[in-house]
Amino acid sequence: MSDNNQLRDVFDAIADPTRRRLICLLAEAEEIPLHELTAQFEMGRTAVSKHLTILKDAGLVLDRKVGRETRFRLNASPLREIQDWVAFYSKFWSTNMLRLNHLLEEEEE
């Protein structure tokens, strides 16, 4: 998978509020079994599993079998790509706000 596809997949994966909530739940725990995650939502196990699969495909979630149970944990490293993207635009807005501030100060003089 190329970097561009991985980046798109991470953005797609976090676009859904249910998946963002799953990420939050996983960030708060070392590992969570599927049945415990499902209990946090008003949807069935299959729907939660589909959301987890999308997160797994983006590299955000890792899973492992423990007997008959599947446990999930967060792999936050792909979120760095989003942080870097947002940081770029943060610099953009900071620079533009600084320019605007200078223009407003010049107008006052």
Image: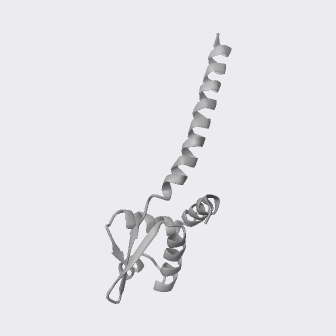
Residue pictured at 52% horizontal, 76% vertical: 53
Q: Nearer the viewer, residue 43 or 62?
A: 62
Residue 49, given in percent of the width and then of the height, sits at: 49, 80
Residue pictured at 64% horizontal, 10% vertical: 109
Residue pictured at 42% horizontal, 71% vertical: 62
- Residue 58 quadrant: bottom right
Q: Is residue 33 above or below residue 23?
A: below
Q: Colour scheme used in the picture?
A: one colour
Q: Classify residue 50 as left or right of residue 92.
A: left
Q: Classify residue 13 as left or right of residue 33.
A: right
Q: Nearer the viewer, residue 22 or 83?
A: 83
Q: Is residue 101 above or below residue 1?
A: above
Residue 18, given in percent of the width and then of the height, sits at: 51, 70
Number of marks drawn: 0
Q: Is residue 40 above or below residue 44?
A: above
Residue 29, given in percent of the width and then of the height, sits at: 32, 66
Q: Classify residue 19 as left or right of residue 28.
A: right
Q: Is residue 86 above or below residue 102?
A: below
Q: Classify residue 46 as left or right of residue 38.
A: right
Residue 59, given in percent of the width and then of the height, sits at: 50, 67
